[in-house]
């Protein structure tokens, strides 16, 4: 690696780390300002709280992992030169479909939980992939803006998933 490339890579890394630190500090300050408890208690719960017990850490990872996977998928789409913004709608709708399959079909009776989780993951991936293809196909076949289509589909999928889960 050339010296210029190394300096640019270090600069990019420092830029990302600094951006994350600034966002973390702004969030912490806003929580301290709006909270009813003392600043020390807020800082302890916000900074150290998720690492105090394995259950809290597991809950943090359970909420964090879908956003990481969705972000990685969106980075992949953006890297391909497309602007498909349907990731949030897929994160809402695909698990709703998997829940409906889980609770309304007998295929999960008597199978190991690892196999059941794998089947649910495959269902989520298939539903998400099929939904992400709709704006892409619209762009290629019908020459419509995939950004507009995917934004409209985000709201549609959000409310459709809420409706399905309330049935």
Image (cartoon, rainbow, N blue to C red):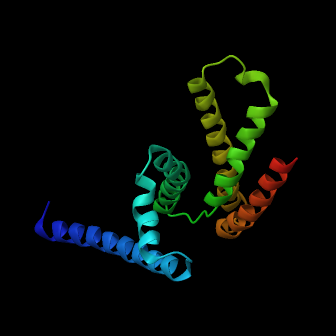
Residue 4 percent location from the top left of the image? 15, 71
Name the residue furthest bottom: 33
Q: Is 36 left, or right, of 163 in this rendering?
A: left
Residue at figure coordinates x 61%, y 58% from the top left: 87
Q: Is residue 46 above or below residue 101?
A: below
* The N terminus sits in image quarter: bottom left
Residue 30 percent location from the top left of the image? 50, 80
Name the residue furthest left: 3
Residue 19 percent location from the top left of the image? 37, 75
Q: Is 127 left, or right, of 77 in this rendering?
A: right
User: In which quadrant of the rendered view does residue 127 lie?
Assistant: top right
Residue at figure coordinates x 63%, y 27% from the top left: 116
- The count of marks equals 0
Q: Is residue 59 above or below residue 123?
A: below
Q: Nearer the viewer, residue 67 or 89?
A: 67
Q: Is 30 left, or right, of 149 in this rendering?
A: left
Q: Nearer the viewer, residue 48 or 144?
A: 48
User: In which quadrant of the rendered view does residue 112 lie?
Assistant: top right
Q: Is residue 152 above or below residue 38?
A: above
Q: Nearer the viewer, residue 20 or 43?
A: 43
Q: Is 35 left, or right, of 110 in this rendering?
A: left
Name the residue furthest right: 167
Residue 11 percent location from the top left of the image? 24, 73
Residue at figure coordinates x 44%, y 77% from the top left: 39
């Amino acid at each position: 690696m050339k010296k210029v490339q190394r300096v640019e890579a270090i600069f990019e890394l420092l830029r990302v780390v600094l951006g994350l630190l600034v966002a973390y500090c702004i969030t912490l300050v806003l929580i301290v300002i709006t909270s009813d408890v003392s600043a020390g208690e807020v800082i302890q719960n916000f900074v150290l709280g998720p690492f105090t017990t394995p259950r809290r850490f597991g809950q943090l990872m359970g909420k964090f992992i879908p956003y990481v996977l969705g972000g990685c998928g969106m980075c992949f789409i953006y890297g391909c030169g497309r602007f498909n913004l349907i990731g949030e709608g897929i994160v809402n709708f695909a698990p709703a479909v998997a829940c409906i399959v889980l609770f309304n079909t007998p295929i999960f009776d008597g199978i190991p939980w690892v196999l059941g989780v794998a089947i649910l993951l495959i269902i989520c991936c298939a539903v998400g992939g099929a939904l992400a293809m709709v704006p892409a196909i619209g762009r290629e076949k019908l020459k419509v803006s995939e950004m507009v289509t995917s934004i409209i589909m985000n709201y549609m999928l959000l409310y459709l998933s809420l409706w399905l889960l309330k049935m």
